Image: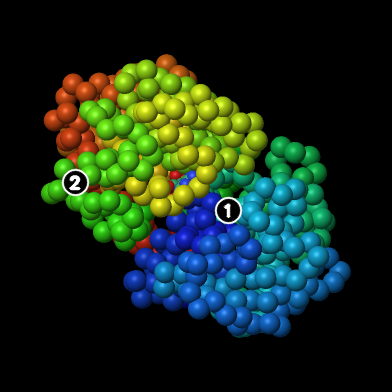
Amino acid sequence: MYIVMITPECAPAAKVGGLADVVHGLSKELAIRGNEVEVILPKYDCMRYDRISDLTKCYSDLWVPYYNRWVHCDVYLGWMDGLKCFFIEPHMDRNFFSRGVFYGHLDDGERFSFFCRAALEFMLKTQKHPDIIHCHDWQTGLVPVLLYELYQHLGMRHPRVCFTLHNVGHQGIGGEHLLREVGLNPAVLMTRERLLDDQRPGAINLLKGGIVYSNFVTTVSPRYGQEIRHTNLGMGLQRVLEVHQCKVGGVLNGVDYSVWNPEVDPQIAKRYNLGSVQNKYANKEALRNRLWLRQGMKPLISFVGRLDPQKGVDLILRAVPYCLEKGCQFVLLGSSLQGDINTAFWNLKSRFNDHPDCHLEIGYSEELAHLIYAGSDLILVPSGYEPCGLTQIIALKYGTVPVVRNTGGLADTVFDANYAHQPYHERNGFVFNDYNWQGFESALERAIGLWTHHPEYFRELMLNGMRYDYSWNHPGQDYLNIYHHIKAA
Ligand code: ADP
């Protein structure tokens, strides 16, 4: 099958969060299975160019309609970890993708609407007729709309569209100019059944457009799929998801075990697997040395992730002093786009700057992340909501026991040591239900207690987690089934 991914992120060069890992891991899995896969991305100035090989200009005659004029774009071809990727570079005074960051500008809606039109125009001009176009999140919501409303009339009748919702917390809300910008007719599209936002009068919702116009919609875990249809985690999309329920399904994300696997990971101090888990402690030692933490018999607790309200930042801010009081060590790696959150963590960092058991690294480091997963005993994921969550899935593979909230993909992958319905050998972490400090504290207390007083049971929990197979093998097949299903329809 011929599959084109149109996406705002793809690891390792263009990564903000899990979406990048998913596009990369899924594409690789599909390619390994003999499918032809191509990825189309914006050519951001802030990409990790050292992770792209043989980047060369491959098409320099792309003219993309933009309001009532044309914008000239160059398209580059490069390879990321064996994946064939096209990068679109518009030449315009607004420098849509040369801003030093991936997201966070007031005109993000316009930037990515343009990207959608440019990606389709590129496919049309280079006569790409894939079986499947797979789009990701609100940034690509206009792709199926443009395909159905414009490009099929220009000859692109073949492709079917699969649209994946990685996080409905971000929907791409804007004015009708986002439609006019790309040559779509607001009078036709601004209805409740199409792109008009259900809650904000007069606004268009790009994510909703993607849901309405795609042939199939996936969520990144089955639980999140239920939550966004039936609870306010749908953030206003409950009705449209209900209307389109027969084409919505949940596929749990996988993890690329050629990158995230302590058995082969070149970025950790000592490799290990189920049979040599004692080697994990060389990584704990290395992590402590690297971050100037003292050695000793203490559990090392960590957090890796975006410091976003979604991730439970208020609970994490309380967990740091709590864990230190309980005699544990704490390592945090994260960054935020929000100034007030960054300030709160910088304040916490200066409070514990000289503490021999605490290190807060406010920033982004792929390499340090690997060592943290390998060197920690426990990892915290107290999210308010979590569409899938890769942190806990990666941690399980590294024998690092997750403490998570019972929501979304966390609920689908972590099973409580004491209370889960699963048999003992399938339990792999600690889970709390309500989003509040009491719930989180009691799960933390149980986790620290087990590490301290029952190391043999704690070790069993680690091994149980390492035995799970959250590779792309199963989800890869699930996506292929979906592609075949919509192709045949
Ligand atoms: P989300 O997509 O909401 O950010 P996920 O748990 O799905 O969350 O994916 C997060 C991914 O990004 C993981 O691979 C995690 O290791 C990585 N990550 C997040 N923040 C950082 C950071 N500051 N440094 C390194 N890696 C990070």
Q: Is residue 300 visible?
A: yes
The image position of residue 473, as x and y in percent, is 31, 60
Taking the image as shown, residue 314 lies to the left or right of residue 92, namely: left
Kindly identify which numbered label has been placed on residue 280: none
Report which residue position mark 1 lands on: 137
Characterize the local packing of mark 1: few (<14), some (14-19) or many (20 or more) Cα atoms within 10 angstroms: many
**Is the CB–ligand 1 distance for label 1 below 8 Å?**
no
Q: Nearer the viewer, residue 154 or 406?
A: 406
* Residue plotted at (31% across, 21% down): 327
Vertical placement of residue 310 versus 132, above or below: above
Q: Disc 1 marks which amino acid?
A: Asp
Q: Disc 2 marks which amino acid?
A: Asn
SS label for mark 1? loop
SS label for mark 2? helix
Q: Nearer the viewer, residue 350 or 7?
A: 350
Q: Nearer the viewer, residue 153 or 182?
A: 182
The image position of residue 319, as x and y in percent, is 43, 24
* Residue plotted at (81% across, 74% down): 70
CA gap between label 1 and label 2 equals 39 Å
* Residue plotted at (69% across, 62% down): 98
The image position of residue 449, as x and y in percent, is 25, 21
Q: Quadrant of the N terminus?
A: bottom left
Report which residue position mark 2 lands on: 279
Q: Residue furthest right?
A: 68
